[in-house]
Image (cartoon, rainbow, N blue to C red):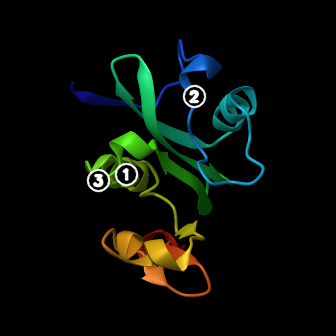
Amino acid sequence: MEITYTDSLKNISHKQLNGFFVGWPNHPNSKKHLEILQNSYKIWLAFEGEKCVGFINAISDGVYYSFIPLLEVLPDFKGQGIGSELVKKMLESLKGMYAIDVVCDESVVPFYEKHNLAKCVGMVKRNYENQS
């Protein structure tokens, strides 16, 4: 089946957000997950039919600085380019920002480096043309 992407939560139910946060000792339930997405500055969701198989969100002041706290793809859908597509779509949505930061585990640093984020204390992208 084809993967489709949306930046809208219209008609999205918390019941479509199950199976994420694998390995987290204390993760948000699907209702809290939907609340996180509803309160985010930008979101992108990946779907196979009606099933949400991946998501990314960003929080921001809407002017200068943004932070990508969550990127998740369901285990059965990893390795299909869904995470990369979600990152590409989010970075395009945030291109007017000066700062786009990600904090990640060391094991996924190469993934973010492929998307032009630079390693530092966290992972950041600076759009200097948007600085002033």
Q: Residue at x 33, y 18 (%)?
A: 49
In three-dimensional space, the C-alpha distance between marks 1 and 3, rounded to whole angstroms, equals: 8 Å
Q: Residue at x 62, y 43 (%)?
A: 41
| Depth check, front residue: 6 or 29 | 29
Please indicate whether residue 50 sits to the left or right of residue 2 in the image. Answer: right
Q: Which mark is residue 17?
A: 2
How far from the left and from the top, in percent, is residue 83? 37, 51
User: What type is the residue that disc 3 sits on?
Assistant: Gly
User: What type is the residue that disc 2 sits on?
Assistant: Leu
Please indicate whether residue 44 sits to the left or right of residue 59 in the image. Answer: left
Q: Which mark is residue 72?
A: none
Q: Secondary structure at mark 2?
A: loop
Quarter of the picture containing the N terminus is: top left
Q: Which residue is mark 1?
A: 83
Q: Residues within 10 Å of mark 3 (few under 14, many from 20)?
A: few
User: What type is the residue that disc 1 sits on?
Assistant: Gly
Residue 126 visible in the current orientation:
no
Residue 110 visible in the current orientation:
yes
How far from the left and from the top, in percent, is residue 27? 73, 46
Residue 94 against residue 121 in the figure, above or below: above
Considering only order in the chain, which callout, 1 or 2, is on the residue closer to the N terminus? 2
Q: Which residue is mark 3?
A: 79
Q: Secondary structure at mark 1?
A: helix
Residue 63 against residue 4 in the figure, above or below: below
Q: Secondary structure at mark 3?
A: loop
Q: Residue at x 75, y 32 (%)?
A: 32
**Which quadrant holds residue 127?**
bottom left
Quarter of the picture containing the C terminus is: bottom right
User: Residue at the bottom extreme?
Assistant: 120
Q: Residues within 10 Å of mark 2 (few under 14, many from 20)?
A: many
